[in-house]
Amino acid sequence: MNYKDIISDIKNRNLKNTYLFYGKEYYLIENALKEIKSTLNDGMVDFNLDIIDGKETTLDQIISTIETLPFMDDRKVVILKDFELLKGKKKNFTDDDEKYFTEYIENTPNTTILVLVVYGDVDKRKSLVKKISKNGVVFNCDKLSDMDLFKWVKKRFELNNVVIDNAQIMYFIEQEGYRDKNSEKTLSDLENEINKISSFVGKENKVTNDIIDQLSQKKVENDIFKLIDYIGEKNSSDAMKILSDMLYEGESVFGIFSMIARQFKVIIQVRQLQLQGHSSKSIADRLKLHPFVVGKALKQTKNFSDEIIIDILNSILESDFKIKNGLVRDTLAIEILISKYCKKDK
């Protein structure tokens, strides 16, 4: 059973008693949960939806919640997240608990839809997983196939009311690298990029390869590298120009802060591994980073001591707090930070 069929059955109220959604594609998991929640009576959702943290519960609590009758609705939904009995190790549950719950799965009341969610992998050898598969639905929410990805991207651009040809959709997908073997990009990341591009071109306007290049994540990452290089060189004018361009192209201040912080953390890690005698290839393998990113970080270690980096990271946290509490405008906060660390006497 594929994902499309599962969602179609849910929308048509052809529901199973038990579902297990797992995998790294959180977007698909959250979409499935949204569709299942939508089957409840709108006015009674608060009474008929229970979300349980599988790491902070007991078997008695889980079963008691499952067996509680729905209130003024035909069914209730119980969402059990990150239940450790679906994984390889047990800390809070015994073997007897696992055996009992595995047998219980066959007898869950028809008035309850039990949805188990694991953000990552499950141990498919476990009897519990096999039992859920036999009596309900088990689906691995992994990356979309090429054709499904194409359809998904096309649909998202259409929903934003922008014009994009099939060739540009393919170009966008290629530039984003979602299907690359080592890519950690998710559909949520792609949706953010689609929304950014759509906002930039405006409704009813056409997306071109040049616009995709101008706003691509690869360009953003390259701009961050340049921004950090300019800060290290105390080149405030070019640093401010890069910042201005990024803001004009739709990047948020919080997003820029996040990417700067991430790169500085990479610089610290790279420096430590280099001092331990690791080659750039070894560092890339250990940190699971692209060799290009490691190469840039190695060059940037020359311009920033660990003390300065820690000071910058603390300044970013302080700026984040001030922005969120209305103490300073976001653009002013990042301009102040860049000016501070571009001063010659720092």
Image (tube, grey):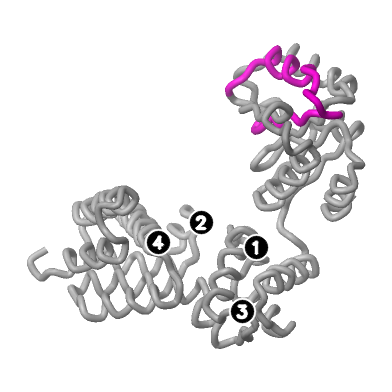
Q: Residues within 10 Å of mark 1 (few under 14, many from 20)?
A: few
Give the residue displayed 54% in from the left and 71% down from the top. 196
Instruction: Estimate the x, y position of residue 229 in percent, counting from the top left.
Output: 28, 73
Cα distance between the residues tagged 3 and 2: 39 Å
The residue under label 3 is 203
> Element under label 2?
loop
Mark 3 vs mark 2: which is more N-terminal?
3
Mark earlier in primary sequence (2, 1) = 1
Return the residue at label 4.
259
Label 3, label 1: how far apart the Cα atoms are? 34 Å
Marks 1/4: CA–CA distance: 22 Å
Foreground label between 4 and 3: 3
Q: Which residues are magenta?
A: 56-82
Identity of the residue drawn at 65% across and 42% down: 120
Q: How many marks?
A: 4
Indicate the amino acid at tag 2. Lys
**Which numbered disc, 1 or 4, marks the residue that appears first in the sequence?**
1
Q: Which mark is residue 181?
A: 1
Task: Give the quadrant of the C terminus.
Answer: bottom left
Q: Is residue 142 shown in magenta? A: no
Residue in the picture at 16% in, 64% down = 340
- Residue 335, percent from left and from top: 24, 67
Q: Earlier in the sequence, mark 3 or mark 1?
A: 1
Decide: marks 3, 2 in contact (CB < 8 A)? no
Q: Which of the two marks, 1 or 4, is nearer to us in this view?
A: 4
Could you tell me if the residues under marks 1 and 4 are in contact, i.e. CB atoms within 8 Å? Answer: no
